[in-house]
């Protein structure tokens, strides 16, 4: 008898807790970032199409649907590593040659530009300003260096030039700092 | 229990974690008076010497400037102006090696002093009459930025601080060798105290704490004497320990308060100023003397007379060294800043700036250069001395692994780069350098993230816009098609009526002949309309495809555009007998012309070139530009060509004259019907039209060729130049020449130049291409 009471009691408790937990799960549901958005955040947003998709978001969708994670050259190993973490798959090396690490931006040789507006149509991020039959130019700060504007130019006046180094952007170069003053002081204080 | 304020007043000091005791080596310079030097023969004043943005230039090359005259002006809050350190002439405004470890050039104003030291007009302020704003304005105009090393604009720091608890004057100067602040206090204690008065006016603190290390007895005595009149100015002697001059460390030392990670001292009611900055403020306000000079410690065993000198901003480091008896040894290093936090200079032509407090020229024996770095043995010595209570060995580990997230987790941002950890490391690991690299990586990463965010936003905005345009275009096209149908129906009806009338009216033979003619004309007209419609439809369809097919659309467009122009001209003369028919024809022509115009208008792309060329009166330059464009387009097409069979290319050349003819014939008709038009203009127009047609054809061929070439690209990745290059080159250069020669005869100079350029480019690219092509031929 007592056995039965215990069973009923436990059963009731289980039901109650189950109901409470079920309600809580609905009531306090955490809106997770959809997977595609998370992947899209990792991709570099260069919108260059080198992955074979017309932009980063389509590739993010493709990854979410099981495409390989190693198709984005601008993202490089870093992006692959993050994607591997996120997707729970092994990081694989990039399937094509990695783009050079040096950041480049498009530059239009302005006296040769005929104002055909083809590069404007090609640029995925609207980084080119100009009007028909007038000179065009690239907004360096907005250019992602995707190369897409180079091919359409009928007079070949667009170059990809390395971004000029500035003092703010400079990364310390270990070899360039031969100052190492510390040891002598150590010796002296000993 | 005493309150904090009472404790501070009673002279209590606290301590911060870690710290080291390197040999100070200040005795060579701290006992000597400040050296005054003759004027150097060149001054290089960098436009940006602080954290923030440079001001806007006020001077031009060749201009004569007076001492203290502003060279730039601050056009926003983060800008700080720079001033002419002496009177003289602006020789140049050009990039010059900046005092930065990168050795990258920054824009400098180069001044040749005239030796007269002629001052501009000066307007000292009288403290009691000044309000807060004018004081802050003066501080900004005088170009004052934190002189302790960071160079943060002082007007921002003081402007934000009102009603703080403590104003701390940092005169600790804990780094070995440096004694610039020490001698400054010895000689100018009273001026410094006046500067503190001004800062008190601005921020109204409860007390002013002046922190000085106990190894500067002369400076302490001088400051104490100068402060004797002022109750709440407390000179605090702190025990010598490195890095007690760090902002957060000194605050903890003097007030026991800790600044939370990622916050500013202001958030806990404290503002700190370097003693050099205070001196500059006093000079700026009381004497109207902008920041044009500073005291620099020039020291090291490679100098015979190490001393503190009053150096004008912009003086090349080499000049200072020479003035102090510089006898360099082989592979001499020059360090700007102290031995712990400084950096080696790439060249001695680097100028002194507002933040340079020390030039160190050590001998190899004095400071041996980097020796062998070994692996971390995880002894933990670094963690014991870290004043920021970090775990340097962990930071090193993650810096090497480039694990930026972990670095952030371990608070790399709090590292003040003091070098204490590297100083004690038994494995001689240059820890700080790893941190500097890692910090730069983190900065770069956050910049990239920001940029990616922007790029994404722009990409999405663009897609949205394109989608919208597409829809708009679709609806407009529908409406247009409807209109056209109605118009056609109406027209048809009109004609039928007309024909019936004519048939009834004209019973004679001649009348029947006329109507026959009319019928033929009508049929032709209908055919033409159908053609135009189809061409247009093709255009629309292709427009909706992606960018590459847009080229094809562009190629079709001129055809459609040229139709309405030629059509009425051909049919008009035959039906002139009937004014009504003529009116109808004119209406059609107008409708078509309008359609042709609106069509390109909404896409705002390639098409306007074709229609506008036909529509506007054309000038010579324009014709020249068009011709140049043709030449260039052809050149590009020739480049895109996969070379072995240059079949499509030669056709482009002959096509040009042909199209010229056809375009001309249609236009001759138009010209004859329209006698009052200027003949000149007409021929120009004809040329333009011909050019447009030629361009369209060239483009079409280009896209064909382009798609072929596209397929070759991957293959050509790593092939090398072979003999084919030589065989191919003359071929296409000849082609380029022939295309260049075809444009209209009255070729003027710029055009010739453009053509020549196009040929040159075509040849260059040709060679490139042929270098990559052999694979295709094989
Ligand atoms: S390759 Fe990378 S950067 Fe380029 S579009 Fe694809 S995901 Fe974006
Ligand atoms: S300007 Fe050219 S390289 Fe830069 S983003 Fe636009 S298309 Fe890409
Ligand atoms: S002091 Fe040097 S060896 Fe010791 S734990 Fe720190 S980094 Fe490693
Ligand atoms: S350099 Fe950074 S990690 Fe090393 S002791 Fe100084 S604050 Fe700590």
Image: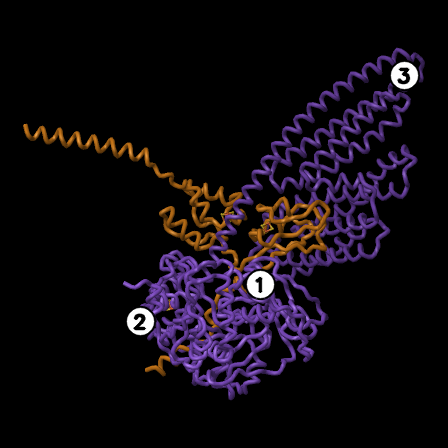
Chain colours: A orange, B purple
Q: Rounded to the nearest whole Å, what is the CA distance between mark 3 and mark 1?
A: 106 Å
Look at the numbered disc 2 and give the secondary structure of its residue: helix
**Cβ atoms at labels 3 and 1 below 8 Å apart:** no
Pinpoint the chain carrying mark 1.
B
Q: Which residue is mark 2?
A: B381
Q: Residue B154 at what x, y percent from top left?
A: 52, 64
Q: Are marks 3 and 2 on the same chain?
A: yes
Mark 2 within 8 Å of ligand 3, using the beta carbon: yes
**Cβ atoms at labels 1 and 2 below 8 Å apart:** no
Q: Nearer the viewer, residue A52 or B742?
A: A52
Q: Which residue is mark 1?
A: B129
Looking at the figure, which quarter contains the N terminus of chain B?
bottom left
Q: Is residue A116 left or right of residue A84?
A: right
Pinpoint the chain carrying mark 2.
B
Q: Which residue is mark 3?
A: B512
Name the residue at 87% across, 41% down: B682
> What is the crowding at mark 2: few (fewer than 14 residues within 10 Å), some, or many (at least 20)?
many
């Amino acid at each position: 008898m007592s056995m039965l009471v215990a069973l009923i009691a436990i059963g009731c408790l289980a039901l109650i807790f189950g109901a409470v937990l079920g309600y809580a799960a609905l009531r306090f549901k955490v809106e997770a970032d959809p997977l595609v958005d998370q992947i899209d955040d990792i991709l570099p947003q260069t919108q260059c199409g080198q992955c074979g998709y017309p932009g980063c978001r389509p590739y993010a969708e493709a990854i979410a649907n099981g495409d390989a994670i190693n198709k984005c050259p601008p993202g490089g190993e870093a992006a692959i590593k993050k994607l591997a973490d996120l997707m729970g798959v092994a990081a694989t090396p990039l399937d094509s040659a990695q783009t050079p690490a040096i950041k480049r931006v498009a530059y239009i040789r302005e006296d040769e530009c005929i104002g055909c507006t083809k590069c404007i149509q090609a640029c995925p991020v609207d980084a080119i300003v100009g009007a028909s039959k007038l000179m065009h130019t690239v907004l360096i700060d907005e250019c992602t260096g995707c190369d897409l504007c180079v091919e359409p130019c009928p007079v070949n006046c667009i170059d990809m030039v390395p971004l000029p180094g500035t003092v703010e952007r400079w990364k310390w170069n270990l070899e360039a700092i031969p100052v190492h003053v510390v040891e002598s002081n150590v010796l002296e204080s000993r | 229990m005493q309150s904090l304020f009472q404790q501070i007043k009673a002279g209590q000091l606290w301590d911060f974690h870690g710290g080291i005791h390197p040999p100070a080596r200040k005795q060579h310079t701290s006992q000597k008076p400040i050296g005054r030097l003759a004027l150097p023969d060149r001054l290089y004043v960098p436009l940006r010497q602080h954290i923030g943005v440079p001001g806007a230039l006020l001077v031009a090359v060749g201009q004569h400037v007076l001492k203290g005259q502003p060279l730039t002006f601050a056009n926003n809050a983060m800008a700080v102006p720079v001033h002419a350190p002496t009177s003289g002439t602006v020789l140049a405004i050009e990039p010059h090696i900046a005092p930065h470890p990168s050795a990258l050039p920054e824009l400098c104003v180069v001044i040749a002093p005239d030796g007269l030291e002629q001052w501009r007009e000066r307007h000292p302020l009288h403290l009691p009459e000044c309000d807060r704003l004018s004081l802050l304005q003066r501080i900004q105009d005088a170009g004052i930025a934190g002189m302790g090393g960071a160079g943060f604009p002082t007007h921002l720091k003081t402007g934000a601080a009102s009603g703080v608890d403590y104003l701390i004057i940092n005169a600790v100067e804990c780094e070995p060798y440096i004694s610039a602040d020490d001698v400054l206090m010895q000689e100018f204690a009273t001026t410094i105290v006046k500067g503190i008065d001004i800062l008190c006016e601005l921020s109204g603190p409860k007390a002013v704490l002046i922190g000085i290390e106990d190894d500067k007895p002369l400076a302490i005595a001088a400051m104490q004497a100068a402060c004797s009149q002022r109750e709440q100015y407390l000179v605090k002697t702190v025990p010598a320990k490195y890095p007690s001059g760090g902002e957060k460390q000194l605050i903890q030392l003097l007030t026991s308060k800790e600044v939370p990670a990622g916050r500013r001292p202001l958030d806990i009611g404290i503002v700190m100023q370097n003693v050099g900055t205070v001196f500059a403020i006093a000079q700026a306000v009381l004497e109207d003397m902008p920041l044009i000079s500073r005291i620099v410690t020039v020291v090291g065993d490679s100098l015979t007379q190490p001393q503190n000198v009053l150096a004008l901003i912009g003086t090349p480091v080499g000049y200072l060294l020479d003035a102090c008896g510089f006898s360099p040894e082989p592979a001499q290093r020059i360090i700007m800043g102290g031995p712990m936090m400084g950096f080696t200079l790439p060249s001695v032509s680097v100028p002194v700036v507002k933040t340079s407090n020390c030039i160190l020229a050590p001998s190899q024996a004095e400071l041996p250069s980097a020796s062998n770095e070994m692996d971390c043995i995880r002894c933990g010595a670094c963690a014991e001395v870290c004043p920021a209570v970090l775990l340097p060995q962990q930071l090193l580990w993650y810096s090497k692994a480039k694990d930026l997230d972990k670095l952030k987790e371990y608070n790399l941002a709090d590292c003040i780069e003091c070098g204490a950890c590297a100083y004690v490391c038994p494995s001689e690991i240059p820890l700080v350098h790893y941190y500097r690299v890692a910090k730069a990586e983190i900065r770069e990463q956050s910049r990239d993230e920001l940029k990616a965010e922007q790029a994404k936003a722009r990409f999405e905005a663009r897609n949205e816009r394109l989608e919208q345009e597409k829809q708009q275009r679709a609806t407009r096209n529908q409406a247009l098609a409807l209109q056209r149908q109605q118009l056609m129906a109406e027209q048809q009806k009109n004609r039928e009526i007309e024909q019936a009338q004519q048939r009834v009216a004209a019973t004679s033979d001649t009348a029947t002949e006329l109507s026959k003619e009319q019928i033929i004309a009508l049929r032709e007209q209908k055919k033409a309309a159908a053609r135009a419609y189809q061409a247009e439809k093709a255009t629309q369809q292709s427009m909706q495809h992606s960018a590459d097919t847009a080229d094809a659309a562009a190629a079709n467009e001129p055809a459609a555009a040229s139709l309405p122009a030629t059509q009425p001209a051909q049919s008009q003369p035959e039906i002139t007998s009937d004014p009504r028919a003529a009116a109808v024809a004119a209406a059609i022509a107008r409708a078509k012309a309008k359609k042709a115009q609106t069509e390109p208008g909404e896409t705002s792309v390639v098409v306007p070139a074709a229609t506008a060329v036909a529509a506007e009166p054309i000038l010579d330059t324009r014709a020249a530009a068009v011709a140049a464009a043709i030449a260039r387009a052809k050149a590009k097409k020739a480049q895109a060509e996969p070379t072995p069979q240059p079949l499509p290319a030669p056709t482009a050349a002959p096509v040009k004259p042909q199209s010229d003819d056809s375009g001309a014939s249609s236009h001759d008709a138009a010209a004859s019907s329209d006698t009052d038009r200027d003949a000149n203009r007409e021929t120009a127009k004809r040329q333009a039209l011909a050019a447009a047609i030629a361009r369209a054809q060239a483009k079409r061929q280009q896209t064909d060729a382009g798609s072929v070439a596209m397929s070759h690209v991957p293959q050509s990745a790593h092939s090398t130049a072979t003999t084919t290059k030589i065989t191919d080159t003359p071929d296409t250069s000849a082609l380029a020449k022939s295309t260049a020669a075809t444009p209209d005869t009255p070729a003027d100079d710029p055009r010739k130049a453009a053509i020549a350029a196009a040929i040159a480019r075509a040849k260059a690219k040709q060679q490139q291409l042929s270098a990559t092509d052999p694979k295709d031929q094989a």
